[in-house]
Amino acid sequence: MTRTDIRFPVDGRTRQMFIDGAWVEARSGKVFETRNPATGEVIGRVPRGDAGDIDAAVSAARRAFVGPWSRFKPFERQALLLRIADLFEKHWEEISQSDTADMGMPIVRTRANKLRVLGMLRYYAGMATAIHGQTIDNSLPGDIVSFTRKEPVGVVGAIIPWNAPTAASVWKIGPALATGCTIVLKPSEEAPLTPLLIADLMNEAGVPPGVVNVVTGTGPEAGAPLAEHLGVDKIVFTGSTATGQAIIRASAGNLKRVSLELGGKSPVIVCADADLDKAVPIAAMAAFANSGQICIAGSRLFVERSIHDELVERLGKFASGLKIGDGADPTTEIGPLVSERQLDKVEGFLNSGRDEGAKVVTGGRRLREGSFAKGNFVEPTVFAGVSDEMQIARDEIFGPVISALPFDTLDEAVERANATPYGLAAGVFTRDVSKAHIVSRSLRAGSVWVNTYHAIDPALPFGGYKMSGYGREGGTEQLDEYLNTKGVWIKLD
């Protein structure tokens, strides 16, 4: 499929946003540009929505929730989700190219996300007919029947980041449709094009007007009004911890329910008995995948001292062999960072690492020459000689940077791994099954992977401990986040 075949071509033209089943401009008439991070070229202009557009979308979502959508039976919601999944499958190349052009993820990775995203949609379709309450015997005198009902929470406001537009959109829209909620989605201003393509596919699948709305705009102008809106019953957010805290404060107006998947500084522990041939590439890509722009990036690499030097050397060789380039090239393994602002941030961390005394094993440079000149490229970087107090070992970088830290005992490694305000994910490499169980139980993180990384399935819950947020995405736990439980009592004559 060529780019001219794409229904939403990345040709710089101006799009509209999707409210109440119609394509509309921002009420202010304002737009903003979105650029290809590999080339710097403008690939689209989208409406710069604000509080008025958010209010229109929330009102449309409320009308749909109490209107026709409320009469959809579970099997009808299931059938709708299956139609959406079929359309996603049919247009997957368009979706993949849109994500790659808009935020830089290598096309091999966006294409490979197909199984996960289609699996999510079809999992939610299955769950749509599995929602039920319970009949519960009570101990009150007389003949009283008691049971519970699971009911949709109502209008959901969803705010997603730029690092995985397709998966993030589906992770919010899918459970809303499965449970009978309606949704207003606010994508990141850094990568708004794919969510608009998704809205078009939802419309083609027959989603009723107002059930799914997509409002583009900035965080302060559109995201904040969505979080504050008194017509929103639930906010679900993926992004930074600081923004998550602001959303909690904004939710107080009507005590709306909140689910947050926030930042991370995930540890990966490599024991001396690990299979290094397998551990090196997995541990490397735990941090380098999507150019490190992923909340679960395994950026703190704790290595048992007896193998530390060997592993770091091998890790450096692996990193230096990765191909950096435009994500549209099928041979690219490391694409650009999403924006110049993000590149400046990552470069600041690289300078901080050097200034604090860490040793650059490989990488550590912003790329400016030749084909990299107009893009936001940085080399995958491995630091050694890192201490736990250094900024590169404490703060979320959101770039392709690994800090290697030696340890002597497993108890020490676990204690240091847990010594962070975050708790989103962690990894362990060992051939000892007892160690695997002990360490996975001891790590304070929402997901722990042993001898693998980045494994995510729709049936398993995903989310954080501590400052990495609360609530879960995936599994039956996610559906509960979109449902209220009502107790019903009936006195029999």
Image: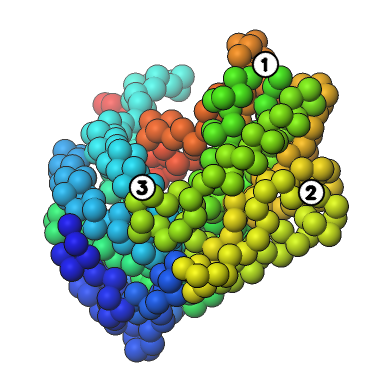
Task: Point out residue 438 in the picture as x, y percentages from the top left corner.
Answer: 67, 17
Residue 280 falls in which quadrant of the image?
Answer: top right
Q: Which mark is residue 395?
A: none
Residue type at tag 2: Lys
Task: Point out residue 166 in the picture as x, y percentages from the top left corner.
Answer: 35, 53
Query: What residue is at 54 percent from the left and 33 percent from the top?
Result: 282
Query: What residue is at 65 percent from the left and 53 percent from the top?
Result: 363
Query: Where is mark 1, residue-wise?
Result: 273
Task: Point out residue 195 in the picture as x, y percentages from the top left corner.
Answer: 33, 62
Q: Earlier in the sequence, mark 2 or mark 1?
A: 1
Query: What residue is at 22 percent from the left and 65 percent from the top?
Result: 3
Image: 208 above or below 92: below
Query: Where is mark 3, residue-wise?
Result: 108
> Of 248 and 298, which appears nearest the observer?
298
State the separation of the CA atoms marked 3 and 2: 32 Å
Q: Residue furthest bottom?
A: 29
State the separation of the CA atoms marked 3 and 1: 32 Å
CB atoms of marks 2 and 1 within 8 Å: no
How did the renderer colour the structure? Answer: rainbow
Q: Earlier in the sequence, mark 3 or mark 2?
A: 3
Residue type at tag 3: Val
Query: What residue is at 14 percent from the left and 59 percent from the top?
Result: 204
